[in-house]
Image (spheres, rainbow, N blue to C red):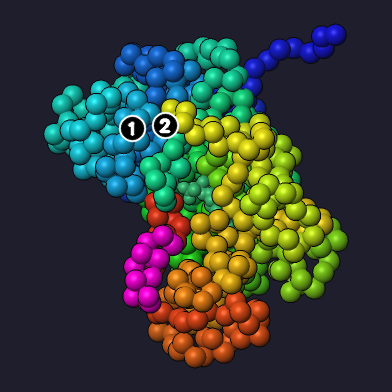
Amino acid sequence: MNSSMMQMPLLISSLLVHAERHHGDQEIVSRRVEGDVHRLTFRQLAQRARQLANALAALGIRSPDRVATLAWNGYRHMELYFAASGSGAVLHTLNPRLHPDQLLYIADHAEDRVLFFDLTFLPLVEEVAKRSTTLKTFVAMTTRDHMPDSSITDLQCYEDLLDAQPGDFAWPMLDENQAASMCYTSGTTGMPKGVVYSQRSTVLHTYAAALPDALNCSSGDVILPVVPMFHVNAWGLPYIACMVGAKLVFPGPALDGESLYNLIESEGVTLSAGVPTVWQSLLTCADQHDLAFTTMRRTVVGGAACPPAMLRRFQNRYDVEVLHAWGMTELSPLGTVCSLTGAQRTKPTQQREAMQAKQGRAVFGIDMKLVTDDGQELAWDGESVGNLLVRGPWVAAGYFRHEGTAPLIDGWFPTGDVARIDPQGFMQITDRSKDVIKSGGEWISSIDIENLAMSHEAVATAACIGVKHPKWDERPLLVVVRKADAHVSRETLLAFMDGKIAKWWMPDDVVFVDSIPLGATGKVQKNLLREQLAPIRA
Ligand code: ADP
C-alpha cells in the first residue's frame, strides 16, 4: 500500500529557501580577510547564492562537477555551499592547512574543476594551479579593487562574477541521493580518503544535529562556528542556522583568543563550536585579562576529547556550559552529544563533570555498538572497552574512488575509536585504536592519562604515547607542555597523578617540550610524537 504523503526530496537548497522565506531578516556577520566586519541577511544571502548558481553555470559547471573551496568561515563560503550543492554540483571543501602535495592529490583525485579561494591562500593556490591536471578555473573571493597580481592566467573575481548575473534561479528538483558535497579525512595515516555526502544525508543530519539534546539550536541563538567550514562543513552549523533561523557569526581568519572574544561580545554570541586547541587560546586570553562572557552560554567541544580541566574552567569560572560531542568526517560529522538528563543535572558538581567528560549518547539516526577484536559484542556496562562501530543514514558506506577497501563490517562502520558505553548509553572514547597503549596484554587509555595530567594547574597540554618496552610490549610516556611561567617537575607531576589512576597506568616517564605537533584539523599528531620520541627512549 502506498502512503498518501507527498514525495518531496530532501534537498540542501530547501534549507536556504526556508531561511529566506521565514527568517529573511536574520543576520550573517563575517569578519573578512580584508579586515572589516561584513553583514548581510539570509534574504540577501539567498539572492547572492542564486546569482552564484547562475555564475557557476556560466563557467560551464554542470552536475556533478566538483566545485572546490579554499576559504575561511565567511558569507561567501556559505554562498558557495548553497550555490554548488543546490544546483547539482558537488561542493568540495579543501583544508588549507594541508601540505601542497596533499592538497594537489586531493583536488586531482576528486577531479575538482573550479577553485574558489580567499586571498590569504593565493601563494598556495598558485602552487596548486601550476601542477593540477583537473582544475581549470580559479576565482578569488573578493571585489575588483582587492584583486591581486598573480601568476594564474585569467584569474576571476568573485564579485564580478556575481554582478554579471541575475538573481533569479530555480533550484532544480534533484535526486535526494545524489552527491552534494565532499570532504577528505585528514589522513594521519596513508593518503586522505574522500567522503561524499548526499543531499538527503545532509538534510537528515541537519534535523538531528539541531535537536535540543544534540546541539540545541533555535532562532534565538547567535552561533559562532569556530570549527572551519573546511572541516566537515563546520559540523553542519551553516545548514542548521538556515533550518532554525539562527544568527550566524563567522570569524574569518582571526582565530586568536582576543579576536574571538571581541567578536563573541560584540555580536552577542550564545553558542560556539570548536576543537579543544582553539578554546585553549580563548580561555588563556580571558584568564589573563580577567574577562567575562556576557551572552555566551554554551560551547560545543569536539573533534578531540575535551579535557575535564577545560570543562571546569568554562563552566565554573565563566558560566559557559560545555556540550561535549563526538563525531568524524565519515559521520557528517555528528555521532554523540553529552547532554545531561534531568536527573544527572541535580547531581553534585563533581559527578556531573565526570559525566560530561564522556562523549555522550547517540543522536537519533545513529546506532552504535562495541565489539572485541574478533567481533564479539560487548555489554554497555561502563567498563568493557572495545571497538566502536556505528551505522545510520549519514554514515559513510565507503570512500570516493576507493573501491579496493570495503570499510563496513556486516553493515556497520568501524570508527577506529576505542570506547566504553555505560548502562544509560553514554559513550566514552578511551582512545583511537592506533593510539591505544598495550601494556602486558591490557589496554591503557591515553586520553584518561592526558586528562589527569591536564588537571594539574601548571600543565597547558599533555599527550600520552606508547613506547616499546622489552617486558611489557609498550609503556606510557607522557609529553607535557607547561603553561607560560608555570613550573612543575617530573616528580611533582607523577606524585600528583599517583593514586588517581591504576598503578600500572602510571607513565614510566615525563618529557617536557615547548610545543606538541598539531595536524590540519587541530589535533595532536601522536604518530609524529611517536616518531620523534620513541627512538630517543629506546
Ligand atoms: P581525522 O580522522 O582525519 O582526524 P576527523 O575530524 O573525522 O578526522 O576525526 C575523527 C576522530 O576524531 C574520531 O574518530 C575520534 O578519534 C576523534 N574525536 C572526535 N571527537 C572526539 C571527542 N569528543 N573525544 C575524543 N575523540 C574525538
Image quarter (top left, top right, bottom left or bottom right) of the C terminus: bottom left
Span shown in magenta? 526-538
Provide residue 417's location: percent of width, then percent of height. Answer: 59, 53
Seen at 44% across and 18% down, the residue is 64
Give the answer, above or below, for where 319 lies relative to 18. below
Residue 196 picture location, percent across and down: 50, 30
Q: Is residue 139 magenta?
A: no
Q: Is residue 36 visible?
A: no
* Crowd rating for badge 2 (residues with CA inside 10 Å; few <14, some 14–19, many 20+): many
Task: Tell me: 83 left or right of 247.
Answer: left
Tell me whether circle 1 and circle 2 mark residues in contact (CB < 8 Å). yes
- Residue 92, which numbered label? 2
Secondary structure that dominates the magenta span: helix
Quadrant in the picture for the N terminus? top right
* Label disc, if present, on residue 2 of the rendered structure: none
Q: Nearer the viewer, mark 1 or mark 2?
A: 1
Q: Residues within 10 Å of mark 1 (few under 14, many from 20)?
A: many
Q: At numbered mark 2, what does the secondary structure look like: helix, strand or loop? A: strand
Instruction: Report helix, strand or loop for mark 1.
Output: helix
Amino acid at circle 2:
His
Residue drawn at x 60%, y 44% is 414
* Residue at horizontal 67 percent and vertical 35 percent from the top: 410
**How far, Cα to Cα, is label 1 from label 2?**
9 Å
**Residue denoted by label 1:** 107
Q: Residue furthest front?
A: 471
Residue 527 falls within the magenta-colored stretch: yes
* 92 vs 216: above or below: above
Mark 1 residue type: Ala
